[in-house]
Amino acid sequence: MLIRFETPAYATITMFGDVAVTLIKLMGHSGAVPGALLAEDVPAALARLKNAVAEHPDATLDPDTPNQHQGDESQHVSLAHRALPLIELLEAAARDGENVMWE
């Protein structure tokens, strides 16, 4: 499953479903898909996500794929890298006072 994040303030972002749901939960949301944040809730969600990343920037956040190679450490992507596009989207939405939706 793929999840798209959209706001009028930024380009649409597409992520693997399990990665996106983890990030949605780190923003303080239930993890439900589809979902949305009202413009007034975006700054708080952004702060929660940034705090989670700051606490565990090197934690791996890899999608669950059936052909994943076990033990191949060079293939892992950190939480900080996975969250960066969503953080930028949330920053743009907060700056412009826009809602954020995902499906």
Image: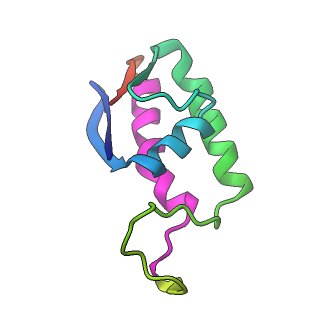
Give the percent coordinates (x, y) of residue 30.
Answer: 58, 27
Q: Is residue 70 above or below residue 87?
A: below
Camera-side residue of 103 and 46: 103
Depth check: 52 or 9 in front? Answer: 52
Q: Main secondary structure of the magenta part?
A: helix
Is the residue 65 above or below the residue 1 in the image?
A: below
Residue, far right: 55
Range drawn in magenta: 75-94
Question: Between residues 103 and 11, which one lies in front from this camera angle?
Answer: 103
Q: Residue furthest front?
A: 66
The part of the image, by quadrant, that contains residue 98 is top left
Residue 85 x, y percent position in the rendering? 40, 49
In percent of width and height, residue 40 lies at 52, 13
Q: Quadrant of residue 13?
A: top left
Please say which color scheme the image uses: rainbow
Which residue appears at 58% of the width and 66% of the height? 60
Relative to 101, 54 lies left or right? right
Q: Is residue 28 left or right of residue 100?
A: right
Q: Quadrant of the C terminus?
A: top left
Q: Disc count in the image?
A: 0
Q: Residue at x 64, y 52 (%)?
A: 53
75, above or below 8, in the image:
below
The answer to whether residue 25 is left or right of residue 85 is: right
Q: Is residue 37 above or below residue 20?
A: above
**Residue 92 falls within the magenta-colored stretch:** yes
Task: Answer whether residue 30 is magenta in the image.
Answer: no
On the image, the x and y values in percent for residue 102 come to 36, 30
